Amino acid sequence: MQLIYTTGNPVIAKVNEAGVLIPVSTGQTTLTITVSQASPGYVGSFKLPVSVTGTKRAQLVFTPKLEVRTVKAGGGSFTVRTVAIPKGMPVTTGYANRKVGTTQPLSALDAAYHADMAINGAFFDSYSGVPDPYDNLISSGLPQHIGNTGTSIGFKWDGSAVMDSLRLRISGTALTSDGRSNSWYAYVMNRLPSGRTTATLFTPQRGKAIGFSAENAIVVRKGIVTAIHHGVNTSIPADGCVLVYEGGEAGQAKRFEVGARIAYSLRTTNMDGDAVDWSDVHTAVGAGPRLVTNGKVTLHPAAEGFRDPKILTGDGARSGIAIRKDGSILLATVPGATMKQWADIMVQLGAQQAMNLDGGASSGMLYEGRTVTVPGRELSNALLFGKQLRY
């Protein structure tokens, strides 16, 4: 069975394909839920009135606080800028120009989402022309990019945060007109192919089009294949997605036909292949490596998939994020440290769980509209916190 969600007026409230209703502005609209089986049978819908009267935020236990500290760790003395954020502070992943694959100054990202605090997020390609991210990104309960390396931090609906070596796998079915159910998969999301072979899922978060002439592009709208293109820079429908298969994966395109019903699921594991439940996570950013686990240094970058000497042995500007014992969040930047020193610093700062974020020229942090760590480049994405976030 497949559920399709739409709202009558997205200016008042938006809804994503997971059924997450997001208030936008005060007013009234209608939520329509359409029920469609992946086999012949019942098809129906019902409507629910939605009234947005304002948002009532949970009472925060303390006011966010900016500090500049001198921390001795790993044989050195470091000037560290930190922002303490109470558990339950609204948070979202911010995308440059609100789509995957572009860049924007951190201050512009902060302003676009009406954030109070911001820190740079996932690694991204800052040298090859198209600034695609490298890591996992989740917004409003839905993945918007799959990287499957390093460590991710996730924020749940109940205000708590989790941290793990999250790995995401997409698998689906295509039910054809003659009743055949063909399986399919995709292992990349919202990213240009890095080689001749790819199986990629593009969502509206990518923008209006996939950005290249794809060998095979399957267009899906409201769970139905509406077109199959070859050698075209295919448009991404606002109410669906595009599946791209090239090179060694081109054979998967033969499993689809116009009119086929499409469904897919997301499998979440850690890097050891053990299942992890992130179903309650609405926002997540991946980067890494993991620095601290249960209050102790746990640094294994090579095991997480890192090969860059800047991560393995070098020093440089660092950004990081920690979960403290009380569930509050700590954002932190330092102008220069090795990863081992960075992990030691996080322990000194009281981290229960901690991970590295993108660094070097990307390292940047804002507090109440003021830049406290100036990034040396425009950014692809960021983690944003604030009482009146504009999603």
Image: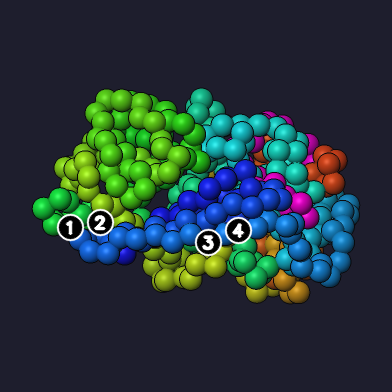
* Residue closer to the observer: 290 or 281: 281
Against 272, residue 195 (above or below) is: above
- The quarter of the displayed image where residue 381 is located: top right
Whether 188 is drawn above or below 67: the answer is: above
Q: Position of residue 77 (x, y in %)?
A: 84, 53
Q: Real-space Cα distance between discs 1 and 3?
A: 32 Å
Whether residues under marks 2 and 1 lie with C-beta atoms below 8 angstroms apart, the answer is yes
Residue underneath mark 2: 173
Q: Amino acid at mark 3?
A: Leu
Task: Inspect the image, locate mark 4, and give the three-letter code of the amino acid beneath it.
Answer: Val
Give the x, y percent position of residue 144: 49, 48
**Label 1: which residue?**
181
Q: Which mark is residue 50?
A: 4
Quarter occupied by residue 159: bottom right
Residue at 24% across, 28% down: 230
Numbered range of the magenta stretch: 373-391
Q: Nearer the viewer, residue 123 or 77?
A: 123
Is mark 3 in CB contact (under 8 Å) with mark 4? yes
